[in-house]
Image: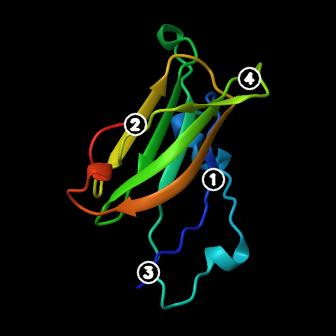
Amino acid sequence: MGLAIAVALFFVPATAAPSGVAAHMARVCAPQLCRPASTVEVRTIVVKLEQLDKKELDRHTLLTVTNPFARALRYRAGLQRPESDQAFATSTCPVEVGKQSFEHWPEPLSRVFMKDLHLVAPGSNESKGCD
């Protein structure tokens, strides 16, 4: 069985009330990826980016990545600040089997770029530690 990666983007405005979150979500997916062939097992890596709108957090940014697979998930990431046209690399940690990871930055970010999403062998060096 192969691994097919489809991109789904969900945007939740910081001002959305918890009861109204679903109404503010948008899904972006190429039609051929939204309906994969029946021979492909469908699982979704959920990526959520939020700007925390609490006074004590002063618009911090939180990235949550959910891994539904039976192997750890690795990726590389870059960040972009609202006042900049340049992205810069940031460290990331593996997302363990069936779990979520949380990356937090104490500032507002306009974009988070993700690349090189891949599953890693159990016990490998790549499945351990942040880089």
Neighbour tally class for label 4: few under 14, some 14-19, many 20 plus, Cα within 10 Å: few
Q: Are marks 4 and 3 in contact (CB under 8 Å)?
A: no
- Dot 1 amino acid type: Leu
Q: Secondary structure at mark 2?
A: loop
Residue that numbered label 1 is attached to: 9
The x and y percentages for residue 19 are 53, 40
Q: Look at 51% across and 90% down and name the residue there.
A: 38
For discs 4 and 2, the disc positioned in front in the rendered view: 2
The mark nearer the N terminus, 3 or 1, is: 1
The answer to whether residue 63 is left or right of residue 22 is: left
How far apart marks 4 and 2 lie (CA) works out to 24 Å
Q: Residue at x 65, y 34 (%)?
A: 13
Give the Cα separation between the discs numbered 3 and 1.
20 Å
Name the residue tied to disc 3: 41
Q: Which quarter of the figure is the N terminus placed in?
A: bottom left
- As drawn, the residue found furthest toward the top would be 56
Please name the residue that numbered disc 4 is placed on.
Answer: 82
Name the residue nearer the viewer: 3 or 91: 91
- Which is in the foreground here, disc 3 or disc 2? 2
Dividing the picture into quadrants, the one containing residue 129 is top left
Spot occupied by residue 26 in the image (x, y as percentages of width and height)? 68, 53
* Kind of residue at disc 4: Pro
Q: Secondary structure at mark 3?
A: loop
Local crowd at mark 2 within 10 Å, few (<14), some, or many (≥20)?
A: few
Q: Earlier in the sequence, mark 4 or mark 1?
A: 1
Q: CA distance from mark 1 to mark 2?
A: 24 Å
Q: Nearer the viewer, residue 106 or 74?
A: 74
- Residue 131: mark: 2
Q: Which badge, 1 or 2, comes first in the chain's sequence?
A: 1
